[in-house]
Amino acid sequence: MLLDELRAVVGADHVLTDPEVTAGYVRDWTGRYVGHTPAVVRPADTAEVAAVLRRCHERGVAVTVQGGNTGLVAGGVPLGGELLLSLRRLDRVEPVDVAAGQLTAGAGASLAAVQAAARAAGLSFGVDLGARDSATIGGMAATNAGGLHLLRYGGMREQVLGYEAVLADGRVLRHLDGLLKDNTGYDLGRLLCGSEGTLAVITALRLRLVPLLDAKVVALLAFDDVDTALAAATTLRRDLASVEAIELFFADGLELVTSALHVAKPFPVRHGCFVLVECAARRDPTDELAEVVERLDGLRDAAVASEPGPRAALWRLREGHSEAINTLGAPHKLDVTLPAAQLGPFTRTVGDVIAAQAPRARTWLFGHAADGNIHVNITGLAPDDERADDAVLRYVASLGGSISAEHGIGTAKRAHLHLNRSDAELAVFRAVKAALDPKGVLNPAVLLPPPA
C-alpha cells in the first residue's frame, strides 16, 4: 500500500490522514478554494522528497506541492484529491557566504527566516512580501513572486543563483554553486522559477543577497485622484535614486483598513488616492525624498516617518488591505499588470466592468504603482461565481496587460492563459512539461489548460 511505503520513508507522524488535521492544508489563504486529499506527506529533506515522488510516479499518483499555503490562485491546494506534498520541514537556512553575498535555504524556509539570516550577516534579501512570516522560499520561487521591492531588486527569478530540485520520477537536479557567470547550458533554475511546481519540486535555492540599507524613510502622500497620484509615482521613480517601493491605494480601502483593523487614520480629512513611497540608503534619505515631494503637483497632504515604529504604522495602512478585505468574506483576488498608459484608466473603469456582471459586488484596488501591478479584490460574490473574474481578465488582456503579475496562474486562471499566450507558446509549454513530467503527476491541475 502506497501510504505504508510513504510512512516508511518519512515516518508515520509525517503522513497525515485525519481530516481534522489535514483541513488546514486543503484550504487556501482566502478560504475560497477547498480541496481534499488522501494524505499530507511531510518529508524532511531532499532524499525523502525524491523517495516520495519516485513511489508516486511508479503508481501514477498525482501530487500537489505546497509551501506555506499563502498562494492566492489555488495552485497549492489539492482540488482534484491529489496527494499533498508539504515542504514546510525543509526549512534549513545555511550560514551566509559573506564573501559571495549569498545564502542557501531549503524550500520550506520562510521569507522572514531568510531575511533574519541575511540581516545578521550585515546583508539583506531583495524580495519582501506582506506574508513574510509564512510564505516560503520554495513557493515564492515557484510563482516567481515579485513583492514590494521589485522596482529596485527584481522578483524571485533575479535572486536565484542556484537550485536543487526533484523531478517527478525522483531524480535529483542540483546546481547550487552560485557562480555569477556560468554559461554551461540551459538555465534550469530560471525555468523552474514561475513553473508553479509543474516541472519539478524545488527543494533548495542559492539566493543572491543585497546591501543592508538601514537608513529608511517612508512617506504617505495624499492626492485627489489616481491620475495625479500616478504622475507623482512617475516622478518619484525617475528622480529618487534611493527609492525601494511605490505603492498605490484608495480612500475606500484606507477606510476599510482603519475600521476593520482598528488603525488610526493618517489624515483628518478624506482624500481620494494615496501613494506610499519608501526610500533606503546608507545615509538618511529624508532630505532627498523631501526635495522631490515638494515638487509634486496636486499633493494634498503628507505623513513622513523615519523611525521603525512610525514607518511600520504607515506600511500597515497598505499591507493591511488583504487582511481587512478578508473580514468581508472570501474575496475573489485578481493580480494584474497594466501598461503604464492604461493604469489610470483601468483603475477608474474596472469597477464598472465588475458591476455589469455583479451589481451587488464591491471592488477594492491596491497595488504596486511602480511596476503597473494592481490587485483587484471583489467581495460579495459566491466563491464559484466566475463571471466578474472572466470579465476583468478579458478587459486586462484587451488593454495589453497581463492576467497574472505575481501570484501565478494556478488553477484559478488556467482557463484564461490563452489571453496572454499564443497557441504556439502553449504547445511549447506542454512539450516542456511532457519532457520533465511525462506522466503528468506534478500539480496536474495547475498552470496549463487541458489541450483543446
Image (cartoon, helix red, strand yellow):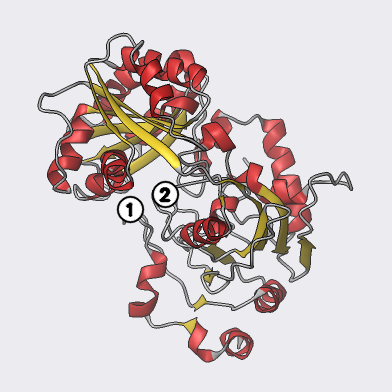
> In percent of the image, x 27 and y 33: which residue is there?
364
Q: How many marks?
A: 2
Q: Residue at x 49, y 17 (%)?
A: 239
Q: Determine whether, in the image, residue 358 is placed left or right of residue 192.
A: left
Q: Residue furthest front?
A: 283
Q: Kindly identify which residue carries mark 1.
A: 30
Element class at badge 2: loop
Q: x%, y% of residue 13?
A: 49, 88
The residue beneath circle 2 is: 72
Residue at figure coordinates x 76%, y 46% from the top left:
431
Is 162 rendered above or below residue 157?
below
Which quadrant of the rendered structure holds the N terminus?
A: bottom right
Q: Residues within 10 Å of mark 1 (few under 14, many from 20)?
A: many
The amino acid type, in three-letter code, at marker 1 is: Thr
Q: Residue at x 70, y 74 (%)?
A: 50
The image shows residue 130 at horizontal and vertical percentages of 39, 48
Label 2 to label 1, Cα distance in Å? 7 Å
Q: Nearer the viewer, residue 329 or 180?
A: 180
**Nearer to us in this view, 98 or 332:** 98
442 vs 321: above or below? below
Residue 338 left/right relative to 48: left
Closer to the chain start, of discs 2 and 1, is 1
Looking at the image, which residue sits at the far left?
Answer: 268
Quadrant into which the C terminus falls: top right
Looking at the rendered structure, the kind of residue marked 2 is Leu
Q: Are marks 2 and 1 in contact (CB under 8 Å)?
A: yes
Q: Is residue 321 visible?
A: yes
Image quadrant assignment for residue 366: top left
Q: Is residue 113 left or right of residue 224?
A: right
Q: Secondary structure at mark 1?
A: loop
Question: x%, y% of residue 171?
Answer: 78, 69
Instruction: Estimate how packed mark 2 is, as few (under 14), some (14 to 19) or many (20 or more) residues with alpha carbons within 10 Å.
Output: many
